[in-house]
Image (cartoon, rainbow, N blue to C red):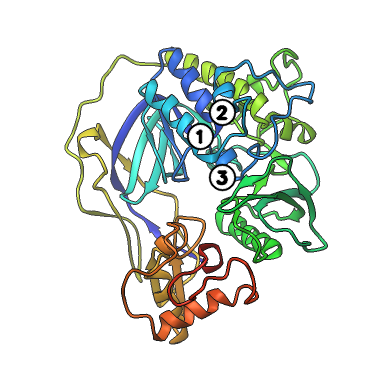
Amino acid sequence: MTNANPSTAQLPVIADVDVLVIGATTGGIAAATAAADQGASVFVISTLPYMGEDICGTYQSLFEPPDLSDPQAVSLSDPLLQSLFPPEQPPTPLRVKTVLENVLIDQDIPFLHCTYAVDVLQEPQGVVVANRTGLQAIRARTIIDCSPTAAIARRAGAAGIQRTADTFPVSFITVGDTTGTDPKLHRSQLPFAAPGPDRPYPVFRHTWDAATDDWSHSRLCAVEQEFRTLVWHCDQIDAADQLAFIPPWAVGEPPTNADSLEWPSTDACRVPECPQIYVLSGCAAVPYTEAHSATNPSVYIPWGRRVGAAAGQQAQAAHTTATPQRRPSPTGLQTIQHDARGAVQTFTDTLRPQAVLDTHAWSPETIATLDSFAVAIMGGGTVGANAAISAARHGAQTLVMEYLHNLGGTGTAGYIGRYWDGFREGFTREIDEGTAAMAPLDHPRQKPDKYVEWDVVWKS
């Protein structure tokens, strides 16, 4: 791994707010609305293409009733909890996504999907975010980090402490598999079934004691892929987009003066090295044995409200009356790293040019070169995934970059499992035969003509 030399780029500032919420979790959305209730301006970014990362991304709490058995849990009196978990039926992912998005829309809180916070800004405070249009800056007087690994807090300098052994439980939820599982996994069936095309399907949680001291995005992806391989079976009809886990470390020691009536406390979310950052996730300063309870929606949402209110009040106290002047947005490409091999550049056009408030000079400490490839393919959809296979077969070291959780595009994630037109011989036929070979010929999900239609889960 090598590093490139830094340059300085002028990034467009797309928001200047009191509170920035990183991660559209249920607790994060509750925090955003509570901060807005304090009169604070708020912005929310989500790494996924939908709201409810902690529920819809992991399938946690969708197929089991809210856990109110824990003495720290609260009743479902919170209006957001009531909307997400109606008493008459289990929530669906679509319901959760819609409710959370409408909550933000109703309070005029702007948000962006598929956006990653990649660096922390100082003077003025904020973050650099990356999405399909390149890099932008968001200025914020306080930041609530809801990412599962407290990524931005760690980037800002949070030291972290070890709470438990290096081995920690990781769980993954699948729908429809009715056979055994790998012996090193513990499998349990969840109370509620998932609706399927022909009947309700059982839902299972698979738990594995994983071990890693590398919390990079690439390492977590490798753990997830290993998990998916262990639990795969042709009888699955669906699976979670993400793993569910609580890292074995926290951003600080649990506070000793926490109010037992408000557990977890707001102080547990504060980062000692970065007073403007709150950590609202299992990485907050709570004992490891209590971290799972803290992220149970019946606890997490009220906790998020308390943290959002505190962040809003803190930001309001530090608020200045100066209004930034709107400036023309930088356009085209800007170099942010360079070395003898070439330059790393970013697009500085934005999705909403009219929303550019200012520019912010940014010079990253370094951008690591993880590897070198002969072919890089942006998007692993219907064309990209097949192009990657072809390039690799011709001996080229190939990299595929895809922001969804699976490959195949419209033919898998888009649930279009039938050809309309086109050439169906050659490589197309090879893929069709490989898809059909994922299960026995007498499997009930086999299609009458494998060269006309396919099972989208098998194809992915």
The residue tagged 3 is 57
Residue 372 placement, left or right of 457: left
- Near mark 3 (Cα within 10 A), the count class, few <14, some 14-19 or many ≥20, is many
Q: Which residue is mark 1?
A: 95
Mark pair 2, 3: CA separation = 15 Å
> Along the line of sight, which residue is nearer the eye, 366 or 103?
103
Mark 3: which secondary structure? helix
**Residue type at the position of mark 2:** Leu
Q: Residue furthest left?
A: 328
With respect to residue 257, does 218 lie above or below?
A: below
Vertical side of 44 occupied by 216: above or below: below
Tell me what residue is drawn at x 52 percent, y 16 percent.
309
Viewer-nearest of labels 3 and 1? 1
Residue appearing at x 62%, y 44% in the figure: 59
CB of mark 1 within 8 Å of CB of mark 2?
A: yes
Q: Which image quadrant for residue 78? A: top right
Task: Estimate how packed mark 2 is, as few (under 14), some (14 to 19) or many (20 or more) residues with alpha carbons within 10 Å.
Answer: many
Circles 2 and 3: CB distance less than 8 Å? Answer: no
Earlier residue among tags 2 and 3:
3
The reply to whether residue 390 is in sight is no
Left or right? Give the position of 95 relative to 200.
left
Q: Residues within 10 Å of mark 1 (few under 14, many from 20)?
A: some
- C-alpha gap between disc 1 and disc 2: 7 Å
